[in-house]
């Protein structure tokens, strides 16, 4: 709650600064548009942060125990909110610099957002019960059909979510759940992949380039890369048919992409076929040996000099002030490989597979890394 109050204060301060400064000094369409962009991005984050109050409420309803609350560690909470705001400001600056268009901030209708809330609450209660009962392999009959042939590590309820990644309900709720968890910062974290792509491929529209996205899920990051590189060909791969179906629906108005059901460990593509291979929030969900296999397989389908990049959770030591929070995350949510992920730097793993690191950075709870295939 204190975080929301702090945020509201920040917004009011920003608004009055704009009104007293830029807007009144030069009441230009540019200044108004910049102001609108800021208001949109920050109010979106406040909306999701306020919805995240649902989480301790659900936990209390299920466990009857007092949940951990932001007021238990106000200093950490204040720091985390400052980091989130910094990410949002950097994201806005990239839009203003033309790295990607402002359409990335386009939102679904408020009615669609609100209609999902009862479902989220209901599924939150179920997830909390699964967590209490330590049940991470619960699948409905439709999802069970889809389990066949999938890797063992994948056959679980990641985050204790219903049917894991294997139902239409899970696909419908997923993006909203992630935004609630990260106070509306998930999209800005996903967009961290665009700057290194731009640095590699320059300011064009992507004409003639072929990108591969692995673990594309419901296509959220795919949409952002598509908007940044409207003429690139994008192939998006995932193991989940319901998530791919959702991705297809969400990108229906765009062209030049394919959605392929495949395992990132064994990609159905030729050697050297792609200019870039990237992923968002994939590696922390994979066992260590699979992480290596996926990087190796990515190298195989990349042309020499091709781009490899990812956005994922911070790892231990990236932002020392967040180390404790990273340790806590897999305890609260079912993330069986997360502890191993945060303790094994991705940089070393990538270099082991013949890549040269080009750039890296962090934003809120996430990091990005970009590399180039050397041979
Ligand atoms: C945390 S989600 C991230 C989804 C999406 N990239 C995003 O930004 O929200 C992880 C995704 O990776 C997919 N996935 C996990 N293991 C995979 C594998 N071995 N091959 C392909 N996709 C995989 C899951 O189905 C899921 O959609």
Image (cartoon, rainbow, N blue to C red):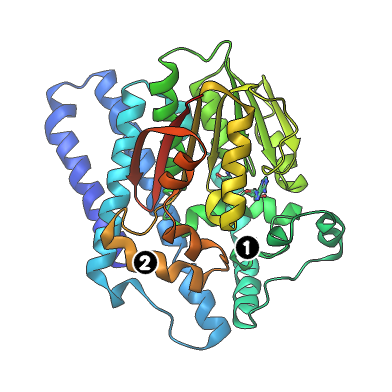
Residue 5 shows in the view: no
Which residue is painted at 59% across and 75% down in the image?
Answer: 128
Count the labels in the image: 2
Circle 2 sits in a helix, a strand or a loop, which is it? helix
Between 193 and 317, which is closer to the camera in this rendering?
317
Circle 1 sits in a helix, a strand or a loop, which is it? helix
Answer with mark 2 or mark 1, whichever residue precedes in sequence: 1
Q: Position of residue 63 (x, y in %)?
A: 54, 86
Q: Position of residue 99 (x, y in %)?
A: 38, 23
Relative to residue 254, is residue 362 depicted above or below?
below
Quarter occupied by the N terminus = bottom left
Q: Position of residue 358 (x, y in %)?
A: 37, 30
The answer to which quarter of the image holds residue 70 is bottom left
Relative to residue 342, is residue 230 depicted above or below?
above
The residue at which mark 1 appears reads as 158
Report whether the residue tagged 1 is closer than 8 Å to ligand 1.
Answer: yes
Q: Residues within 10 Å of mark 1 (few under 14, many from 20)?
A: some
The residue at which mark 2 appears reads as 325
Q: Position of residue 336 (x, y in %)?
A: 58, 67
Which residue is painted at 37% across and 66% down in the image?
Answer: 325
Which residue is painted at 23% across and 19% down in the image?
Answer: 28
Looking at the image, residue 294 sits to the left or right of residue 155; the answer is: left
Looking at the image, residue 74 sits to the left or right of residue 194; the answer is: left
Which residue is painted at 28% across and 26% down in the image?
Answer: 32
């Amino acid at each position: 709650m204190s975080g929301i109050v702090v945020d509201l204060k920040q917004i009011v301060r920003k608004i009055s600064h704009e009104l007293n400064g830029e807007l009144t000094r030069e009441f230009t369409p540019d200044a108004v548009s910049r102001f609108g962009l800021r208001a949109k991005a920050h109010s979106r984050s406040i909306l999701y942060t306020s919805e995240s109050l649902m989480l301790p409420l659900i936990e209390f309803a299920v466990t009857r125990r007092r949940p951990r609350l932001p007021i238990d560690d106000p200093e950490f909470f204040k720091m985390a909110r400052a980091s989130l705001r910094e990410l949002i400001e950097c994201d806005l600056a990239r839009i203003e610099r033309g790295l990607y268009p402002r359409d990335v901030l386009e939102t679904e209708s408020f009615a669609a957002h609100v209609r999902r809330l009862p479902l989220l609450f209901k599924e939150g209660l179920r997830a909390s019960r699964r967590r209490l009962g330590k049940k991470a392999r619960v699948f409905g009959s439709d999802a069970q059909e889809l389990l066949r042939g999938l890797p063992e590590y994948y056959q679980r309820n990641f985050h204790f979510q219903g049917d894991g990644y294997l139902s239409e309900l899970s696909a419908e709720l997923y993006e909203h759940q992630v935004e609630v968890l990260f106070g509306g910062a998930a999209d800005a974290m996903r967009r961290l992949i665009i700057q290194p792509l731009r640095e590699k491929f320059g300011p064009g529209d992507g004409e003639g380039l072929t990108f591969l996205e692995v673990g594309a899920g419901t296509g959220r990051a795919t949409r952002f890369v598509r908007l940044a590189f409207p003429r690139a060909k994008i192939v998006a791969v995932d193991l989940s048919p319901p998530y791919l179906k959702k991705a297809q629906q969400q990108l229906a108005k765009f062209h030049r992409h394919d959605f392929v059901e495949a395992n990132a460990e064994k990609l159905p593509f030729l050697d050297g076929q792609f200019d870039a291979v990237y992923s968002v929030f994939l590696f922390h969900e994979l066992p260590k040996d699979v992480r290596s296999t996926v990087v190796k397989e990515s190298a195989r389908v990349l042309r020499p000099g091709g781009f490899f990049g990812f956005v994922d959770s911070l790892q231990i030591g990236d932002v020392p002030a967040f180390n404790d929070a990273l340790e806590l995350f897999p305890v609260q949510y079912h993330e069986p490989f997360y502890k191993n992920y945060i303790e094994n730097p991705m940089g070393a793993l990538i270099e082991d597979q013949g890549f040269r690191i080009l750039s890296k950075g962090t934003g809120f709870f996430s990091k990005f890394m970009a590399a180039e295939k050397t041979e």
